Amino acid sequence: MISARNRPEAPISALLRTVLRNYDDLGSLLAEAASHQRHPVGSALIQDAREITDALRASATGDSASWSVIAARLHDTGAAHARSGHTVADILIARRIHRQVVVDYVRKTGDRLASTPEKVLGAVDQVITACNAVSAELISGYRHAESSPLHADHARAVFINELLWGALSAARVEATARQFDVDPDQEYFALRARPNPGRGLDELARSLGFGIGRSNGGGLGAIVDGELVGFLTSQPDATSCGISGLGPARPLGLLHESFRMASRALHTADRRSLTGVCKFGQLGLLPAVLSDEATGEALCRRYLDPLGDSAFATEIVDTLRAFLTHGMQAPRTARALCVHTNTVRYRIAKFEELTGASFRGNRTAAFELLWALEHRAVQNAPPATAAS
Amino acid sequence: MKQTIDPQSHYVVNSIPSGVDGTDPSGGLMEVVSGGLPLATSTSREALPAMSLDFGLRARAARVLLLGGAGGVARRLEADLIGVDPERTYVPFRARAASGFMLDELASDLQLHRSATRRMPVAEHEGDLIGLLPETPNPVHSGIVGIGPDAQIDKLVDSFQLASRAVDAAVAFGLIGVHEFADLGVLPTIVTDTDVGDTLRCRYLEPLFRIDEGNEIVAVIESFFANGMHVDATAAKLSLHPNTLRNKIARFEDIAGVDMRNTGEAMQVWWALRFVAVTDAQAKGRSE
């Protein structure tokens, strides 16, 4: 519960006031730290700089009422973390990273302002006190939610989360699966889904076959960080409620592999404005094009940049796309584009001249060009979620 | 010419007269020892006495500039110390000795003892030689060298990662010599993206392995790609009538559910074949 004993108490220093004024910098640093986290649970928990800066401000004013408001919010956040399936370890790891980022920032600000070591140490001390107070309230909220009747849901969410991120040993997978009436000997398809604008997560879950967190065939689902994650015994039907990524069938112990691919499928669907249920196995090379920025950039430099940025360059690119789609046959390409065959041949020859590439004798150039075109298409199109 | 490469090769670091303390600036070993380049190793403590102070600085600078983890100020300090100009660009490399060659032979092949490169950062890292060069090196025969795009010191970490991917891809595909990341096309992605490679293998090749003539069809499709997907050239190479070849390709299309005239689908089949070649070679390397 909310407790006054957690309240950080100390007059705030000028150094800390400077730190608090630069809230945006701190937010960027936390976002950067979050982006380096391999585990996205940690990433989601790290991003918000407001918790710690608010706690420091409350410390500055010494205002109990202000701290009560903040503590209540932290308490609710802790409870939400519990219901989302985060573990206490997730929260503590995130808090540690959070604290380190803020402490580093205080030190750097101290250097910039030429503060004395005593002042810097004092400010660091205050940051640590405030961080501890924030952690205490988060954990308090987490524990409270854990002891509530919703605990069964929470425990299921934790199991799903750990299963999908490969955090369980084989023995624990089997034992815990039986607790939740999940057949440990069956194969499952991992799923990660996001509702379309205006549609709810519950609606999406129902449309994908999850009733109260459980799918018809014996799979499980949970809401984690605003997304539906889970696993099913069969591939779901397409739904208009949202966009889903589906991984291949895997035994429970290897479900994290399927979930990784489901996540990549969802990301691909998002970037290419695909809808419905996107199966990783049917996306071909698109997930690889999206993942490997460096290769895409290198191939664009080789095959597209030499064409320049003129209207003629656009014509060449359009012709190349059609050429690749129509079996690299000039007559078929010409028919599709309603131009003369020699026009197609001229544009292809111009491409070969400008890039030094050749389509004769091997198909590698064609494959690499196709990759470059896909990469450029992805670069030029904003993510569907951003567009919406 | 391609040579077989043993990716598990171990390398020998040059020996050095005993009693020389690598941390002692008066050690006097500012030059290359015993005809090769003295190499620092992050894994072999006994090799450390072999390092002159000069090389210690070179190795430390290489790690700071290429492996990351240091701030901008630290990078500039290291660069200053070793004489690397922060205003110009350098080529990061990662080199692996070919089977039958030692790392110091590769260092010599890369001409790291020449006056222009004698003070450039270089170190041994995880059994490879890593470092910077003023420009792309000349061809080598004693190993595989991955090259990242040239970059100023603040961008070297990213560029070095591409050099590492280049050497891994070149080794996986049995290539020898110097390879720039940008020139390897999609080969580095085939090596690293096992999710996609394995999915395509299951989709296009797995069905073939369940039928009697599966291996023969795979060999035909391999040859078809090797001959630029030209029916006549492939048929001549395989001593088949063109119509027989067309029938075999049609049979493959039927079993795998693919249209080889569609460049995108053909590329997926090509990718699956390359992926299988790499994973088979890696499995063979492990079993040996």
Image (cartoon, coloured by chain):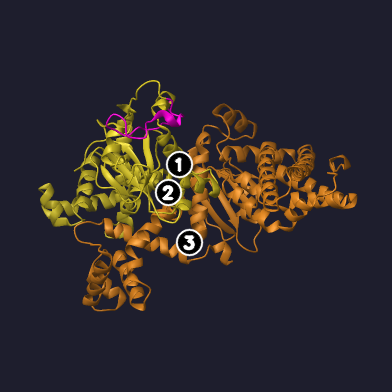
Coordinates of residue B110 in the picture (x, y in percent): 28, 42
Highlighted range, magenta: B21-44
Q: Colour of chain B?
A: yellow
Marks 1 and 2 close (CB-CB < 8 Å): yes
Query: Considering the numbered disc 1 on the image, is that residue within a helix, a strand or a loop?
Result: helix
Q: Nearer the viewer, mark 1 or mark 3?
A: 1
Circle 3: residue type: Arg
Q: In the picture, one chain is orange; tell me its letter.
A: A
Q: What residue type is labelled 2?
A: Val
Q: Name the residue under label 1.
A: B61
Give the Cα separation between the discs numbered 1 and 3.
43 Å
State whether residue A149 appears in this view: no
Residue A77 placement (x, y as % from top left): 75, 48
Q: Give me the residue at 70% from left, 51% from top.
A: A114
Question: Which residue, given by chain and number where applicable, does mark 2 sit on?
Answer: B84
Marks 1/2: CA distance? 9 Å
Q: Is residue B263 left or right of residue A107?
A: left
Do dots 1 and 2 share one subunit? Answer: yes
Chain holding disc 1? B
- Name the kind of residue labelled 1 in the image: Ala
